[in-house]
Structures are given as structure tokens and as C-alpha cells.
Image: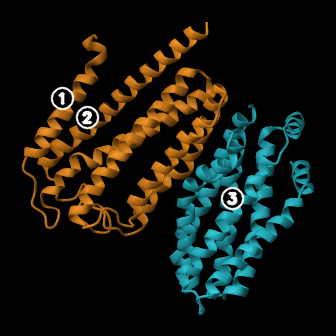
Chain colours: A cyan, B orange
Amino acid sequence: MQKDFRLEWRQRAALNGMLLYVGSTVFVCYLSFALRGGQLPAPAWNALFWIILLFTAVNAAAKGFLQESRGRLLYYYTLVRPQAVILAKIAYNAVLLLGLALVGFALYAVVLGNPVQDVPLFVGNVGLGAVGFATTLTLVSGIASKATNSSTLMAVLGFPIMIPMLLLLIKVSKNALDGLEFEASSGSLLTLLALNLIVTAVSYLLFPFLWRG
Amino acid sequence: MSIKRNWWKVLAIVLVLYTVVAGLLVPVPRLDIVNESIRNLYFHVPMWFGMTIILTTSVVYSIRYLRTPTARLDTLAHESAKTGIVMGLLGLATGSMWARYTWGAWWTSDPRLNGAAIAMLIYGAYIVLRSSFTDEQQRARISAVYNIFAFAAAIPLLFVLPRLTDSLHPGAGGNPGFSNYDLDSNMRMVFYPAVIGWTLIGFWITQVSSRLEFLKQKIYEKQLA
């Protein structure tokens, strides 16, 4: 498991690319809104932030399986159990997305202003979101990598599954923006946590079947 | 066609006929705004019951497929999902028409409506996924994996989320609706048979389309031989 994680870590060439991707997306958003002048209203700020994160996540997680060569997959197959592979991939994607999301948030707050009133809650929520995206998208990228038109499929398969999660995330981060007390969002946070656990468990169970192909 | 094996088809026909006749003729309670459109309960709500039951059947077939991979179970899962989609679309259509005359809009941003739309997107993705494989066994296995994954990840939330928020939809946010005082005994007499009848019709459609699919596979195999 640890070895697998290290294997993942070694091919982090994509990391710089992804960082640049977040950076340039945020900058494009900043420029397009700066033309209008003035501050973004809080709901729009929130929605834009999550859309940027969503697309970053899809792009970053798609690399997970799509970039693997057939030979390397076979090599993993001989080396470790499939469960270890999926857990390592999920862990790697979670760390990757967590980093990307935090960097994205920092950049976003610098150029587009930071109307968040409850920063710890917001950051915690972003963390849960990043982990949730990672767990969902890892298996989806595994599924998509088997099909012929994988890059389209990645979005088609992933987005509907992520919408409920995204709605919860946006609700909690809106609470954080408005500085509501913690009780207002604790229920949604628990639901998110439970959802992450369910998705991880289901991925763990299903991946061996995917792997055989 | 022995009656012993096909009694449920007869039951389905009788129940749906009963629903259509009684649903349009039996008196209903007068409520503000909703008025006669409350009769939509007999057609709209059973669609969602039927859809949920049939999609659950589809997932069960997918799980069974992963345990024992046979082409038969894969076809059954696929056809169940397709029937589920049809029922879902009918549910959306009946709901949308009802909304036009009671709320004044075809579509409102309501958690239930959005949830239904998401469910349709998920199963649309399932169909698209199936069409993008050339190898049959791979297609069967991977779409079964996606079917189970999507069902586990999204469907429970689609039932939970609407209950966490207020909405215009009957049965939520203090709006008159399902299982309240207004579903009087007359309406129950029609509503429960309607749910059973429409669900049985859904199973029947699935059975017929699966049989067609089995026959197509048989013909295909004969042509190959």
C-alpha cells in the first residue's frame, strides 16, 4: 500500500501542470469579471469557486487511470491486491485535490476577494469536498479508462453522481460565507462524511471487478 | 399462457384499468389551488414508485451479474434500467404538466425535481457507457460496476436531500400532500392499487423487452454459427 502510494507519487509530473491549470482558470475568471468592475456577489463567488474546483478535480482525477500504460497496470496486477491499488489511488487523488483546492482557494481569495466570514469551516468544507471528489472520481476514471471515448465519458459519468455532493458542499460553504454558527451546517457535514465513507466502501468492493478486464 | 404463471399480468391490466376509470371518476376532496389536479396522484406518484422499484431490480441484477457473469443477467439489468428511465421520464412529464397548472411553471428549482433530473442523467450516462464498448463481456461487467456505484452514491441522497429542505412540492415544507389528512379513504382505494398496477406494468414491459433481446441474441448466435 505504501509502496503503491510512492509509485503514484513518483509520476507527479502532472502536478505542476495541474497547479498551472488552477492558476490560469482562476486568473481567467478574475479577468472576465474584472471587466465588469466591482465585487462579485457572494452566491456567485461561491458558485464560481465550486465550478472551478469541479473542473479541476475532473481533470486531475482523469489522469489517475487514463495515463497508466497497459504494461504498468499489468505490473501492478502481479505486485499487489486490487484493493490496495484503489485505496492508494484514492489516497493519492485526495491529497492531490486537497493541495489543488487549497492553492486554488488562496489564489481565488487573493484576486477575487475573500468574503468568507468563517474561514475554518470553509476550509474544512473544501477539504471534505476535495476528498469526496477524489473518492468519486477515482472509480469513475477507472471505469472511463476502459471505454473508447474516455475523456467525454469522464464528465458524463462523473457529474451526475457528484451533483448531490456538490449541492451539500455549496450549501455548507454558503453558511460559512454568511458566518452562520456551526450547528447550521453540522448535519450537512455529517452527511458529506457519510457519503465519502459509502463511496470509498463501494469503490473498495467494486474495483476488483473492474480490474480484471 | 397458463393463468398460474401469468396471473400478475391480468392483475396489472385490471389494476391499471381500475386506476384510469376510478381515478377519473371517484370523487376527490376539494383543496385550494390543487382542485381536480389532485387526480394526478394516481398517475404521477406511482411512476416514481415504479421507477425506484425497477431501478433497484436493475442494481440487484447487476450485483448478481458480478457474482455469476451470464449474458442473461446483464440483459435483464440493462432492460430494467431502460424501463426505469421510461417510467422516470413519464413521471417527469406528468409532474411537469401538473406543475404548469398548479404552480404556473413547467419547471421550478425544487430539490425533488432536480433530484429526478439527476437520476435521469445518471441512467442516461449508464446507457452512453454501454454504447461505448465493443467487447460484450467488458461492457457487461463495467456497466454493472457503474450501475451499482451510481446507485449507491447518488440515489440515497436523492431521497434524503428533499427532506432536508423546504419545497413547493406536495408532502414537503408543510404543503398539503401525500399521506396527510387530504389523502382520504376514497383516494387510498385508488392510490394503492395504482402503485401496484403501474409497477407490475413496468415489470411486464421489462420482461417483454428482455425476451426480445434474448431472441435477438439467439438469432445473432445462429448467424455466427
Q: Residues within 10 Å of mark 3 (few under 14, many from 20)?
A: many
The answer to which of B71 and B41 lies nearer the viewer is B71
Q: Which residue is at the far bottom?
A: A38
Residue A47, position as x, y percentages in the image:
57, 74
**Residue displayed at 86% across by 67% down:** A16
**Residue displayed at 46% across by 38% down:** B56
Residue that label 2 marks? B197
- Residue type at tag 2: Gly
Residue A58 is marked as 3
Secondary structure type for disc 3: helix
Q: Residues within 10 Å of mark 1 (few under 14, many from 20)?
A: few
The answer to which of A25 and A167 lies nearer the viewer is A25
Name the front one of labels 2 and 3.
Answer: 3
- Residue type at tag 3: Val
> Mark 2 or mark 1, which is nearer the start of the sequence?
1
Residue B14 is marked as 1
Decide: marks 1, 2 in contact (CB < 8 A)? yes
Residue A67, position as x, y percentages in the image:
82, 48
Tell me, yes or no, if residue B183 can be seen here.
Answer: no
The answer to which of B72 and B175 lies nearer the viewer is B72
The picture quadrant where one finds residue B50 is top left
**Residue displayed at 76% across by 46% down:** A86
B119 up-or-down from A205: above or below? below
